[in-house]
Structure formats: C-alpha cells, structure tokens
C-alpha cells in the first residue's frame, strides 16, 4: 500500500502537463503512486508519452470538470493519502517523497496535511508564497482547527495539502459534486467548477478532526495569464460571496474558525471590488451582496480594525456604495501625493549622498584605514573579525572601522570604531579606505578605486550551489540579479579559501580575476589555539555541568521554508538522551538570532538540558564547548571538523534540499560521520557508541583531509601578511599537514 497517491487531473492547459509528468518520471518515488485523470485527447496523448511506465492513466472525456476528474482519480487510488495536482501546475523536485515521508509520521486522527507552495506566472519564475511564516509558527504538532483557526488564512488551494484517503471518501459528497445550496434549502445539488476550488480547500479544514503542517514547499501554483482565460461573468463574481456564505453557515457554532473566515471573506470581497474592472451595475450589485453578507455573518463582539481598513468595512456594512467610491478616490489621490513627496525626498537624499561620496572619492586613499563588515553589517564576527584581531597585532598602524547596522551597534565590543550604513561618515570612510574586508558583498554603489584593496573572506565551505550556479535553481536564487552580482564580484582583489574544493567552486561560481588565497579560514584558527582553560570557561558560561556531554544542534537555512522550525522533537530527544546530555540549539543567522519556540522546554526539568544558543556569539565558542555536532547541510560541519570531534548528519530531507538548492557533492556518500534519516535513527546513534565509533572516525578523517586542508591555526596571519603587509606567498608560514596538527583539547580532556 503506497503512502501517497498523487492524482494529476484536468486538461493539458497550455501544454504544461508534459513538464509536470517529466518531473515525476525523472526520479524514483518510493511509497508514492501516480494517477493521471487526463481530460481530453491532448492530455491523454501527453500522459502516454511522458508518464512513467508504472503510472495509471485514466482517460476522461473533454469537458469533464475538475471535481469529477479528481473524484475519478481518487476512486482508483490505493495510497493512505491523496495529493491533488492540477495538470497546469507543477511539483518541485522531491516534493512527493517529502510529503509521503511527513504523512507516514502522522497518526490516523490527522485528516489534512498542509504544506507550503510557490507561485509562478507566464512572466515570473517561482516566487515564495506568504504562507511560510504561518506554517512555521504552526510547527509540526497536529491540532484541531478550533485550536489553530489561523490556518484558514493559508492560500486556499487543494494542491497545498494532502488529504487522508479514508477522510476523503467519508466526506466525498461534500467535497465533490453534491453540494446543496444552504441558502435555498431543497434546491438541486450543484456541480463544482474551477472557481469552487477554494471552497473545497476550506471545507477540508472545516471537516477535519486534526490538521498537521509541513513547513516545506511541495507545490507550484502556476497562474495563467488572465487574458488567456475566458472573462469572468457577473455570476462568477456574485458566486464568490455565495461560497463564503456557505462556509460561514457551516461555522456558526465554531467561534474561532467563524471569526477568521469572516475576516477572510470581507478582505477578499473588498480586494475584488477594488481590483476588478467591473461594469457599474455589476459593481453596485456585488457591493450590495457583499454588504448583506458582512452584516448577516458578523461574529458576536466583532471589533473591526481601526484606520482606513476600519472605514472601508464600516462603509461596506452600511451598504454605502457612493460614499465608498468617494473614499476610494480620495485615498488614491492621497497615495499619489504621498508617493510623489517620498520620491522627491529620496531623490534629494540620493543626490546629496552621491555628491558627498563623489567628493570623498576625489581625495587620496588613506593607506592606514581598513573597513570591515560581516553578515550584512551585523557586527564583529567571522573571518573579518579574526583578520582584524591579527591586524591589530601585526600592523597596529592600520585603523579598523566596522560597518554595523544601527540596531546591532549596542552589542559591539567597547571601543569599537564603527559607522552606520547610509550616514555621511559611512560613505566618506568607504571612499577613502585602502582596505575593504567583508564576508559578503559591499553594496552596488560602492566604487572600486584602483588603489584600494577588496578582500572577500566568505563565510563557509560550499556544499550548496552558490553564485552563478544558482541560475538553474530559481527557488534558491529568488530573483537574484546575476549581472549585478558579477559587478560586485569584479571588485574583489582577493578571495579567501579553506581548501582546494572551495577554491575551485569559488572560481566556478564567481568567474572573475581575483586572486585566490589558499590560506585557510581565519575564523578557524581558534580551533588550534584555544586551551583547556578557555574551554572550561565557555562551558561554564553556557551552564554545562562538568562531566556532562554537550551536543550542538545547528541546522541550516532552507530556501523552500520561510521560517525555521526544528526538524526534531527536541524535548523528546532530550528525554531519550538523559540527564547528563545538554542540547545546544543554534538557529541559522538568517532568522535573526531567534530559535523556534519549540526549542523552549515545556517542563522545567528540561530547562537545563535544552539551551537556545541562537543569539550566542561567537559560534566558534559553541563548537569548542560541544562534544559532538549534529547538523544537516550547514557549513558549520566543515569548520567543526577541525576539532576532530564526532559529527552526525541528520538528513531527513536530503533529496528535497539537493534538488531544490543544488549541491556540489553527495554528502550522503562522503559524510563526516554517521548519517540519520529519521529522529529514531538519530536517537539510536546518540544513545549508543555509534556517534564516536571506528566507522565514524574513519569517515571524519577522510572528510578532514579534504575540507580542513589549509586550516592549521595560522590562517589569519597568512592573510594579514599577504594582503596588508605585502609579503610574498613564498615567505608566508607554510600550512601544517592535517595529520601533524593538534586541535584544541576536547571538553573531556579540558575537564
């Protein structure tokens, strides 16, 4: 019995079906069956030519509506779960497997699994939806709709949810073509149309006992060009209100879902009224019906929003069509005036800034001034920080100035000279500095002076595709301007590398004339210079009791997720690992230093065993404190390998990550230690000797030889001597072979 039945349904609209079926046939789909309910001869011919041999094709006559096609496919499905995919839409690589694996974890009480999607149009690539943050907040714990009514705010698509097959068959009449009109009791059932898909999507949630979420992209909603579709009729606009009224009638005795649906209805009606170019009689009638619905279904103790939105709702409920139109006209006029004023202020500020910057560029370069920045101006960190520290030791005449965003300035070490982006001193400093050091790029507006030196330090060894290599992965690139990227890369004089793999990948991803500095990552020097006392102090600061094992859990960012939800039940893991293991949980810096609320233990007994260290800097201290690292695809694994301590890779979504983001090598074939694909496997590794057994040590040794090639504790010195002091490469301290290095002591050795 397959876990998931993917039901592709509908006609071959604008020829998109071939690409969808090709993507499904391109990779193995364990636990997944594919059924194509092909409407019309073109769809049937396409299915026969492009579907995998094991795919079941159901030929359906032209004119079969979407509801009937879905029903035909569901009737032949044998999976525990159903995923309805319209023939015009798409599936990201690995999506069916991701959904099937998540569904397999769920108990039978869960009826609907919600997940994220991207949307594309004829003129735009796949763009992220607005649902990701809501799914991230929901986490992985299943719940009832009454406890999570906000899930009704998710985009109402059937494609962004999987439906338990038994649940579908129980309520099939209500989810397909037997939908009596609740406002006309006794009226004949009315067959669903494409416009009714949102109604069906909402109804799945209203009928479900429990709902689960998956904060990953597993669907592509392809929006067809409106001009290619038949124009909408007045009846279709009125039907929008009719559908919401049917939903609200269902929820009269459920206050939380009713309140959310009411808010969704009013917003949707007002948005449709504002954006649709309706003939005057249709506009008046639409407004009248929307007004009646807003009054009829208004929740008890309803408190409308304040401001312009509240005014719009009040006018709608009054049925004040003429005054609403006047309000719209006045608002448009005000917005136009404000927009004009803002544009003028921006132009004036830009001209002043440009004038000041150009004047500063006309002055001589200051050979004793260096500008440092890291992680988009977050503060003193990473390779730039290690270089600045060594620079103060070897060339104290060179004055460092850090670029730091205003909100991060209070966290700077005392006495740190810094500038805030956009200020006059910021532009003057950038214009006059001899050295510009960053682990990301400086803004496009920064001019590369001929006698200035730009040093790109990067901030990790690349497993995932970077730079131009992202062009084939739109979910990762997210509209990246590659021409502008190359213009920034062309300003680099030097590029720092930790190993020859990285050197080759940087030269491939960022093709330009920069000089590769195969000197190691300066931030990793501490893994060879730290002593036992430093490690004891760090562990005490983190509250790790002597003799306890500390495991650092540091997952990476996923381009197909809007927020971070730990992929582990950390409370359950902590319970299994026992009282003498501490979990240090580190969220990715993309999420602003805030770990998920799920990392906070529910019971005080776990408070000392699960420690949120997402805001702790520097991360190198966390590595020094940890007996072992658990990560997925984060570049922290390459740095931590310098310590020659156990690393466990938890790769529950490797296929999705690899196909969505793209990778440079197969981590599953060349891991730095043990690999787990489920939480149970991870628990087994960490509760036995597997995490530090002979096999893990052998894998780690091979990994260290490849990826810790130039990191030996003297990388910062080599960079400073080469770039700032102008010494030749031959005169620099030679790199110590991996087998001859002595890493910092382990916590056990330091105790």
Image (cartoon, rainbow, N blue to C red):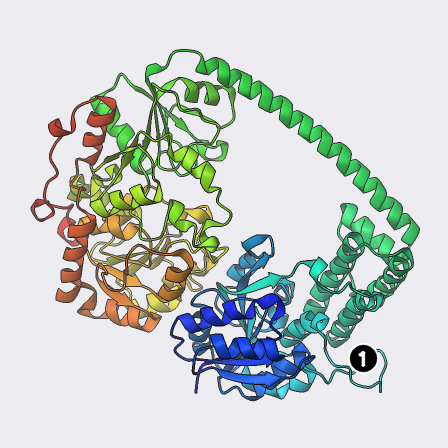
Report whether 510 appears left or right of 154. left
Front residue of this view, candidates 83 and 243: 83
Front residue of this view, candidates 525 and 335: 335
Q: Secondary structure at mark 1?
A: loop
Front residue of this view, candidates 235 and 744: 235
User: Residue placed at 13% from the left, 61% from the top?
Assistant: 698
Q: Where does residue 751 sit, x and y in percent of width and height?
A: 16, 50
Q: Is residue 504 above or below residue 493?
A: below
Report whether 669 appears left or right of 90. left
Quadrant where the image shows the N terminus = bottom left
Q: Where does residue 204 sit, x and y in percent of width and height?
A: 63, 76
Q: Where does residue 38 sit, x and y in percent of width and height?
A: 58, 79
Report whether 565 appears left or right of 574. right
User: Residue placed at 43% from the left, 70% from the top?
Assistant: 98
Report whether 95 appears left or right of 282. left
Q: Is residue 218 above or below residue 57?
A: above
- Identify residue for label 1: 182
Q: Where does residue 194 sit, x and y in percent of width and height?
A: 70, 72
Q: Is residue 102 above or below residue 506?
A: below
């Amino acid at each position: 019995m397959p876990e998931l039945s993917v039901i592709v349904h509908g006609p071959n609209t604008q020829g998109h079906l071939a690409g969808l079926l090709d993507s499904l046939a391109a990779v193995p789909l364990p636990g997944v069956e594919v059924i194509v309910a092909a409407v019309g001869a073109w769809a049937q011919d396409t299915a026969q030519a492009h579907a995998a041999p094991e795919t079941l094709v159901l030929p359906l006559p032209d004119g079969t509506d979407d509801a009937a096609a879905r029903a035909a496919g569901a009737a032949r499905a044998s999976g525990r779960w159903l995923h309805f995919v319209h023939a015009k839409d798409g599936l990201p690589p690995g999506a069916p497997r991701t959904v099937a694996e998540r569904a397999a974890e769920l108990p039978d009480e869960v009826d609907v699994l919600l997940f994220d999607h991207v949307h594309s149009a004829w003129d735009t690539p796949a763009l992220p939806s607005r649902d990701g943050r809501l799914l991230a907040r929901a986490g992985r714990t299943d719940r009832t709709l009454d406890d999570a009514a906000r899930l009704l705010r998710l985009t109402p698509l059937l494609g962004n949810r999987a439906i338990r097959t038994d649940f579908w068959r129980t309520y099939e009449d209500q989810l397909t073509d037997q939908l009596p009109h609740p406002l006309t009791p006794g009226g004949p059932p009315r067959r669903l149309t494409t416009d009714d898909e949102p109604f069906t999507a909402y109804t799945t949630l209203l009928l479900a006992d429990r709902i689960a979420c998956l904060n990953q992209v597993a669907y592509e909603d392809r929006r067809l060009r409106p001009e290619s579709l038949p124009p909408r009729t007045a009846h279709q606009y009125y039907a929008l209100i009719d559908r919401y009224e049917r939903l609200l009638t269902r929820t009269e005795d459920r206050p939380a879902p009713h309140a959310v649906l009411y808010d969704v209805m009013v917003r949707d009606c007002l948005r449709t009224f504002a954006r649709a170019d309706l003939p005057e009689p249709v506009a008046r009638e639409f407004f009248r019906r929307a007004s009646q619905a807003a009054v009829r279904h208004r929740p008890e103790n309803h408190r409308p929003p304040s401001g312009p939105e509240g005014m719009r709702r009040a006018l709608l409920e009054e049925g004040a069509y003429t005054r609403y139109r006047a309000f719209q006209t006045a608002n448009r006029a005000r917005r136009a005036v404000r927009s004009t004023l803002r544009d003028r202020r921006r132009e004036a500020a830009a001209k002043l800034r440009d004038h000041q910057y150009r004047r500063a560029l006309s002055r001589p370069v200051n050979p004793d001034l260096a500008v440092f920045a890291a992680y988009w101006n977050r503060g003193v960190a990473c390779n730039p920080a290690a270089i600045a520290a060594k620079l103060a030791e070897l060339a104290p005449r060179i004055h460092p100035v850090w670029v730091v965003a205003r909100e991060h300035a209070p966290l700077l070490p005392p006495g740190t000279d810094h500038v805030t982006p956009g200020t006059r001193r910021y532009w003057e400093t950038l214009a006059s500095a001899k050295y510009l050091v960053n682990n990301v790029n400086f803004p496009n507006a920064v001019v590369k002076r001929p006698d200035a030196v730009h040093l790109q330090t990067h901030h990790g060894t690349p497993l995932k595709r970077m730079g131009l290599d992202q062009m084939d992965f739109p979910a990762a690139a997210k509209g990246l301007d590659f021409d502008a990227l190359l213009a920034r890369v062309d300003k680099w004089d030097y590029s720092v590398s930790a190993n020859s793999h990285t050197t080759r990948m940087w030269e491939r991803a960022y093709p330009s004339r920069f000089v590769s500095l195969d000197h190691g990552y300066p931030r990793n020097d501490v893994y060879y210079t730290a002593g036992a006392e430093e490690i004891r102090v760090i562990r005490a600061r983190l509250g790790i009791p002597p003799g306890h094992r500390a495991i650092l859990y540091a997952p990476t960012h996923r381009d197909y997720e809007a927020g971070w939800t730990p992929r582990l039940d950390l409370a359950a893991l902590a319970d299994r690992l026992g009282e003498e293991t501490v979990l240090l949980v580190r969220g990715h810096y993309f999420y602003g230093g805030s770990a998920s609320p799920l990392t906070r233990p529910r019971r005080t007994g776990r408070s000392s065993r699960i420690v949120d260290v997402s805001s702790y800097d520097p991360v190198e201290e966390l590595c020094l404190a940890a007996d072992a690292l658990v990560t997925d695809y984060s570049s922290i694994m390459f740095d931590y390998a310098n310590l020659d301590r156990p690393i466990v890779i938890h790769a529950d979504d490797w296929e999705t990550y690899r196909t969505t983001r793209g990778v440079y090598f197969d981590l599953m074939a060349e891991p730095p230690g043990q690999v787990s694909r489920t939480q149970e496997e991870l628990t087994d590794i960490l509760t036995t000797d597997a995490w530090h057994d002979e096999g893990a040590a052998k894998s780690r040794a091979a990994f260290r030889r490849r990826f810790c090639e130039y990191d030996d504790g003297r990388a910062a010195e080599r960079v400073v001597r080469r770039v700032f002091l102008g010494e030749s490469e031959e005169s620099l301290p030679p790199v110590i072979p991996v087998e001859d290095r002595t890493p910092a002591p382990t916590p056990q050795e330091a105790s």
